[in-house]
Image (spheres, helix red, strand yellow):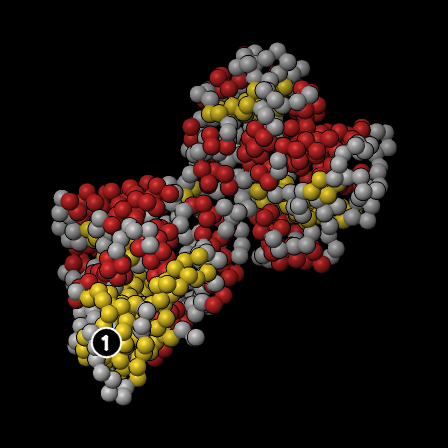
Amino acid sequence: MGMLIKSGHVVDPANGLDGIYDILIEGVVIKEVAPSIDSIGMEEVDAGGLHVFPGFFDAHCHLREPGYEYKEDIESGTKAAAAGGFTSVACMPNTNPVADNDSVIRLILDRASEKGCVKVYPIGSITKGSEGTRLAEMGFMKQAGAVAVSDDGKPVESADIMKKALEYASGFGLPVISHCEEMSLSEGGAMNDGFVSTSLGLKGIPAAAEEIQVARDVLLSECTGVPVHIAHISTGGSAGIIRAAKARGVRVTCETCPHYFSLTEDECEGFNPYAKVNPPLRNEKDRLAVIEALRDGTVDFIATDHAPHHEDEKNVEFQFAANGISGFETAFSAAYTNLVMTGAISLGRLVDLMSRLPARFLNRYTGGLRPGAPADLTIADLSAAITVDSSKFLSKGRNTPFNGKQLHGRILMTIVNGGTAYRRDK
Amino acid sequence: MIPRELKQMHFGKDLLGIKQLDAEQIQYILEIASGMKVLVQAPNKKSPHLQGKSIITLFYENSTRTRMSFELAAKYMGGTAANISVSTSSVAKGETLIDTGRTLDMMGTDIIIIRHSCSGAPKLLADNVKAAVINAGDGMNEHPTQALLDAYTIYEKKGGFEGLKVAIAGDIRHSRVARSNIYALTKLGAKVYLAAPPTLMPPGIERTGAIVARGVDEAVEGADVVMGLRIQSERQQGAMIPGIREYARFHGIGEERLALAKKDVLLMHPGPVNRGTELTSAIVDGDRSVINEQVMNGVAVRMALLYVFTRGGRYGNVD
């Protein structure tokens, strides 16, 4: 059993790779990476004219199982992830029941080993039921396999609980991922606060709703000395607060998502429910500031916040529509188109932002494309121009504002532990 | 009754907002409305324009004048009018807006008049039904038929819009009437001044072409038209304003403030008025008030709209 990937343009900055190489896979690991490897009768993949990257790692997604299988399940979610070039995903605990104890964490891992085609790392909740009042059993959850904790989907409203959570989680070395949203400012809001919300007559969510809690969490991290990670930053203000905090040595990290550096609030025009997401799509100034923050290292990595929903939850009055974007299958193309093709960052930096850096954040980095490392990689055609067609998604969630848009770069094949997790039909 | 010289014009299937109309289309509706007004004032109010057409008012929010004027407009023109209100229909059982719309479609409805507390609900309905949809007010988005009847009232009294100063004072943030009036009146060439406490002024509103005044006095000064907006009591609970007494003193309009406007100013209000809050009783009942005429014009304008939108958004001499 083996596989030889021939003549691909391999990009993996961590291993100093940026050129044409052959990659030999034996069993579940990479055996050799060299300019030319002779075939000895194993399966061959011709990657001539294509790019080969270490498999992407998504540190923030929603697989919806258990409880919301009508939106997505671990089988469909991991298939969609593989189609997006991801070989590992970390899923948020806002399932039903909430993943706030070790038995739900174990259930997710069991389902993933039965049905999952990429590696699944569950994230446990910070508080019981994600209700923001009592700490969840982080120790047991870690023992069961949780890689981080988060109450994602809603904020930990009490600063006191958040401070205790940061301190307590640090005892287990568990990263705390904070969803920042000052509810008294955001409640009832449906999109970014600004001219477009005024023009559509929708209640706006000001940037300050996010930034106030980003600032709070930075200060809590600073006063306790333990790390905090800010989920899905969407505004220039959040980037500014984190940049300044990092400069004075605060142990804060953050992520952003493809929609925040690709799209703006203008997508909501015509009451398009597929552009409804939390935090909301912001304005052009914020979009450019997020790109700058990716460029200068303020943002540590890219996450999808893949949030699949059923059509019936989107095709309703805008105010009632669910928040979220099905993100796995457009993440790389959106990032390549809006970050690399525009010259904001290099292809190597993008590969790092989508694979090594998020994996390292969750302490799951396995070494990238080097001999002995697990054979997790993806093959892409960067010359392909694509028109996003969500009806072709492998995810059950077809909810995306990218539908119909032109992007560049297409994932053709994804390999997890040496096995083919995704291969695009010719 | 309908001016014969009007050429054919296309409006599209639905009337969702003033945003979709241009100045020429607005003028066109006002012309037809002037013909309809003759009918409203006639001793025998009956015309055959809507014979064989069915009109349904689907109201998810309370309304007296808008709903009644649509129903009367339909009946004056011989149409069949029926109404659905939230409490008595399957809406209360949780039927989706799209399903309700499709049901009405299957019953042979030509026009659905919808009022809804969610901005954008009429568009969602329009995208999913064959019937024409007329927006009778959606959330904080638009109230196009109100803006058209307001424009008609100004047109009738002033003969045009170019260069007129129109002051709109009150809760601009939550007002669909304000938004539709801003779009309509700026398109028609008027200068629109807005006055509200900063908590009730929505962000970026100046990008519509309206001018944000520094206070109600600046807005009203030298105005040709002064439009008051209703202050809703629920806004106080949201701490938008400290109370009615302070609002009336600093933002309300009475004789003294109205005297800052031109002598022949028109005082307007979409109703219902909170007497003594946004406007004093003295000026509501005074000789510059056209608030009651607005109501009559509302019927004429809605007749014009029902006529246009039962003909696939087309109107003209195609005999």
State which quadrant residue A170 falls in: bottom left
Task: Give the answer, above or below, for where B199 lies relative to A96.
Answer: above
Q: Residue at x 28, y 71 (%)?
A: A8
Residue type at mark 1? Ile
Q: Is residue A291 visible?
A: yes
Count numbered badges in the picture: 1
Residue shown at the point (46%, 60%) measured from the top left: A387
Residue B75: quadrant of the picture = top right
Q: Quadrant of the C terminus of chain A?
A: bottom left
Question: In this orientation, which residue lies closer to the viewer: A112 or B148?
Answer: B148
Q: Secondary structure at mark 1?
A: strand
> Which image quarter is the N terminus of chain A in?
bottom left
* Image: A294 above or below A391: above
Residue at 50% in and 35% down = B174
Residue B182 lies, in percent from the top left, at 55, 30
Who is closer to the viewer here, A422 or A32? A32
Residue B97 place in picture, x, y as percent? 60, 54
Residue B20 is left or right of residue A55, and the answer is right
- Say whether residue B23 is left or right of residue A44: right
Can residue A127 be seen here? The reply is no
Image point (18%, 49%), residue name: A221
Residue A231 image point, x, y percent? 29, 54
Residue at label 1? Answer: A23
Percent of width and height locating residue A93 = 32, 63
Dot 1: few (<14), some (14–19), or many (≥20) neighbours within 10 Å? many
Frontmost residue, B202 versus B187 = B187
Q: Chain of mark 1?
A: A
